[in-house]
């Protein structure tokens, strides 16, 4: 991969962990179980390894991210859409199977695609997130190997899950054909793993990368505090959802809404510098914004994604329809809102930039160019 930098665990700690930009994707610890473990959702070590160049640094989406080079390598083209990245088509879709549609967060497309791939024998594992059996609503990486497993992970959990640990486990367990579902940070990590010139951890076994549109994830402690403030016990929550500018909490006792703007205070620190809404390096990205209730917005980015959607449709696993331009514009608007806000955060934390001999504050760039 062009523009790769070299670094080790010390560099990862000083540049990513101590600066508060770690996204807890699981890429560093997933592939280095010898030295790295996670504590309070951050990588930590009891003993340092002596490598000058480590896979932990190489795979992390927050150390360096040559996004346009990666886009070219993975998708075969460069974006003309700065908000949504490179894509070939945006459509609407939903699962046709009633049980999948019922259990899915929106249209159930992600679950339908995974079960279709597994039924057809195209994959032998799906790396997804599943809620913990011991801690209510705590997302955990999960390697699904059956339709029942995939269904057990359906639905959205708005906390961060170190999904890449599941990918590392699936590879270590000998799975040969893997699909993974992830947020933009997971997808970036997965592509860095696949494109690494230095470390081959068999990332090529991941044949399908399904991205989820994402504005942010919530910090567990802050979310629990918010629920307490709203008078909700996490044990009583049946579903969380985001839509119409609201964070919706469904319990047996009814629905409680909080303005999404009021949820900003619960955002994970590391999400504040994320410059990707639409999981721009996926084969296919799936979300809800812009779609009718019970449907998904689907962004097809490359041949793998196109074939997957076409084949799943032909097999009757999903139903699709066109998406009107004004609805696509809604997706773009939300992406733009995330990006412009977070770019400001990135610039503020970057400080003065050196461009050859010029030293310039990014916020004053427009005065010169
Ligand atoms: C943190 C988060 C933020 C999101 N923000 C937006 C947004 O701003 N706008 C928008 O349009 N859509 C957003 N989405 C996507 C949306 O919630 C649905 O996941 C998407 O529409 C797919 O719907 P579905 O019915 O096909 O999903 P399903 O068929 O229910 O499948 C969802 C899949 O996502 C996996 N998953 C659930 N939670 C996580 C997690 N935390 N990390 C990794 N994988 C997970 C599940 O294991 C499952 O495989 C977000 C999702 C998440 C998890």
Image (spheres, rainbow, N blue to C red):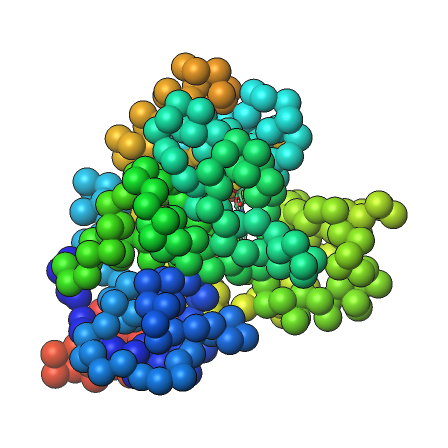
Pick out the residue farthest to the front.
173
How far across and down, in percent of the image, does residue 321 sit?
A: 48, 21
Q: For the C terminus, give its image quadrant.
A: bottom left
Instruction: Write down the quadrant of residue 106 in the picture.
Output: top right
Identify which residue, 124 or 127, lies in the foreground: 124
Left-right relation of 102 to 50: right
Q: At 54% from the left edge and 26% from the top edge, which residue is drawn? A: 94
Q: Is residue 212 above or below residue 88?
A: below
Say left or right for 44 vs 8: right
Residue toward you, 331 or 274: 274
- What residue sits 61% from the left and 28% below the top? 101
Q: How many marks?
A: 0
Q: Is residue 2 left or right of residue 297?
A: left
Work out whether 278 lies above or below 318.
below
* Residue occupying image coordinates x 37% and y 21%: 310
Which quarter of the figure has residue 186? bottom left
Image coords of residue 308 (percent x, y): 36, 27
In the image, taking residue 6 as reference, residue 347 lies left or right, namely right
Q: Residue at the spot x=58%, y=56% of the render?
A: 139
Q: Position of residue 182 (x, y in %)?
A: 44, 49
Quadrant location of the N terminus?
bottom left
| Location of residue 350 in the rendering, given as x and y in whole percent from the top left corner | 34, 79
7 relative to 164, above or below: below
Does the rendering let one see residue 88?
no
């Amino acid at each position: 991969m062009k523009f790769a930098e070299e670094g080790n665990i010390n560099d990862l700690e000083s540049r990513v962990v101590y600066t508060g930009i770690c996204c807890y994707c699981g890429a560093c610890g997933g592939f280095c179980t010898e030295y790295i473990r996670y504590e309070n959702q951050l990588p930590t070590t009891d003993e340092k390894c002596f490598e000058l160049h480590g896979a932990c640094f190489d795979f992390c989406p927050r150390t360096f991210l040559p996004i346009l080079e990666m886009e070219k390598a993975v998708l075969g083209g460069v974006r003309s859409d700065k908000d949504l990245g490179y894509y070939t088509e945006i459509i609407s879709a939903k699962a046709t199977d009633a049980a999948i549609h019922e259990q899915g967060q929106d249209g159930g497309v992600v679950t339908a695609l995974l079960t279709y791939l597994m039924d057809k024998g195209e994959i032998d594992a799906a790396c997804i997130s599943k809620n913990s059996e011991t801690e209510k609503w705590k997302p955990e990486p999960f390697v699904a190997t059956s339709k029942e497993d995939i269904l057990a992970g359906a639905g959205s959990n708005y906390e961060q899950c170190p999904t890449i640990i599941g990918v590392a486990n699936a590879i270590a367990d000998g799975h040969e054909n893997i699909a993974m579902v992830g947020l933009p940070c997971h997808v970036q990590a997965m592509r860095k793993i696949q494109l690494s010139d230095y470390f081959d951890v068999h990332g090529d076994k991941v044949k399908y990368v399904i991205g989820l549109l994402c504005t942010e994830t919530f910090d567990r402690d802050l979310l629990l505090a918010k629920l307490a403030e709203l008078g909700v016990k996490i044990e009583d929550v049946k579903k969380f959802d985001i839509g119409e500018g609201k964070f919706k909490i469904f319990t047996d006792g009814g629905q409680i809404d909080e303005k999404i703007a009021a949820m900003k205070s619960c955002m994970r620190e590391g999400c504040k510098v994320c410059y990707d809404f639409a999981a721009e390096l996926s084969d296919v990205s799936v979300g809800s914004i812009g779609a009718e209730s019970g449907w998904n917005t689907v962004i097809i980015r490359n041949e793998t994604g196109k074939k997957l959607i076409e084949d799943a449709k032909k097999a009757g696993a999903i139903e699709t329809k066109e998406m009107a331009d004004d609805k696509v514009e809604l997706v773009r608007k939300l992406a733009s809102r995330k990006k412009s806000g977070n770019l400001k955060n990135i610039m503020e934390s970057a400080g003065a930039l050196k461009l050859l001999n010029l030293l310039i504050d990014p916020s004053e760039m427009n005065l010169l160019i």
